[in-house]
Image (tube, rainbow, N blue to C red):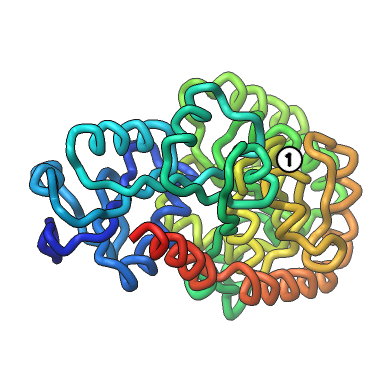
Amino acid sequence: MENKPAGELQLIVPNLHRRYSGVTATNRMVSPKLARMFRAAWFGSHRPDGVAGLRFVDLLRLWRRSTPLIWHARRNDEMIAGLLLRALGWPLKLLFTSAAQRHHTWLTRWLIRRMDAIIATSALSASYLQREATVVMHGVDTERYAPPQNRAAAFAEANLPGRYAIGCFGRVRAQKGSDVFVDAMCRLLPRYPDFTAVIVGAVVPEQQAFANDLTRRIAAAGLQSRIIITGELDIEEVVCWYRRLTIYAFTSRNEGFGLTLIEAMSAGAALVAARAGAAEFVVDDGVTGVLTPPGDVDALVAALEPLMRDVAAAQAMGARARARVVDKFSLDAEANAIAAVYRTLL
């Protein structure tokens, strides 16, 4: 194990999902903060800087250790792995973070009942768990996701038409509302030539037909140069795209939390958000953003158009959004709340 002897370990952060996802992103952001408070190690892919790595051979050395250590799972497979390890003699205290805002499958319910503690990322998520949970909302690194000194210059670096960017981030698929965003842009961009729309996210093979249909709609509207789908990008490139945005559209039909909400707000973008995930808990409607019904193109157009028409108003909303995130949704606040749960287990 890098940096720390296995015998000193207090916390294992498993990430058993090879594909980079929103769950992985939230885990990577808060774990370095927790690693400053607890002797922690990351087990699996996409390890962030600031957290030691735990190899399989290091995990074997922890068998039948006398003092307990926390296994903080965020997916079913990580709960299953934790239960198996504990049954075989690893001294694990099992914690699960749930972001889902729906009734769980029988398997997930069975696994949740066997955890030592549960964290929910919103009060709504907690309401579906059928057991006591501590609500800890996600935070964002407000220094990393900070507004640029000059947003116009940041946008100019992209070499795109116009002067302003409006974005929608996440995998290109119906659940993320990529089609809702494209349909709204096909109606609005012809009226606002200073704007270019950007979808930052991967097109996975099983969603290629969906993405191809979006490309056809964009071409039919003659907007190939003004609605850009970037494909999968490195995280640092994604951060750069946030800084180029004047407006961010959160169009998910359903979501666990929706980390892009607070990332975009932290970067100072004006926000129009569907009422999915944690949007209603995060957004002060009409002040730090505008809430709309999920999947409603007309409502999205109606909410976006005033901000596109009055860029100064959009910029003022973005400044208020940034202030709200700094005040309420910092990584330090999230890490401190998670640490309080860890202490009850140790």
Residue 296 percent coordinates (x, y): 84, 36
For residue 31, what is the image quadrant?
bottom left
Residue 280 percent coordinates (x, y): 76, 53
Check disc 1 and report the residue beneath it. Answer: 181
Q: Number of callouts in the render?
A: 1
Which quadrant holds the C terminus?
bottom left
Q: Is disc 1 surrounded by few (<14), some (14 to 19) or many (20+) residues within 10 Å? A: many
Observer-nearest of 90 and 18:
90
Check the image and report above or below for 17 versus 308: above
Query: In the figure, is residue 298 to the left or right of 89?
Result: right
Observer-nearest of 138 and 236:
138
Identified at 57% across, 58% down, the residue is 136
Identified at 53% across, 43% down, the residue is 98
Query: In the figure, is residue 192 to the left or right of 254?
Result: right
For residue 81, what is the image quadrant?
top left
Identified at 14% across, 42% down, the residue is 56
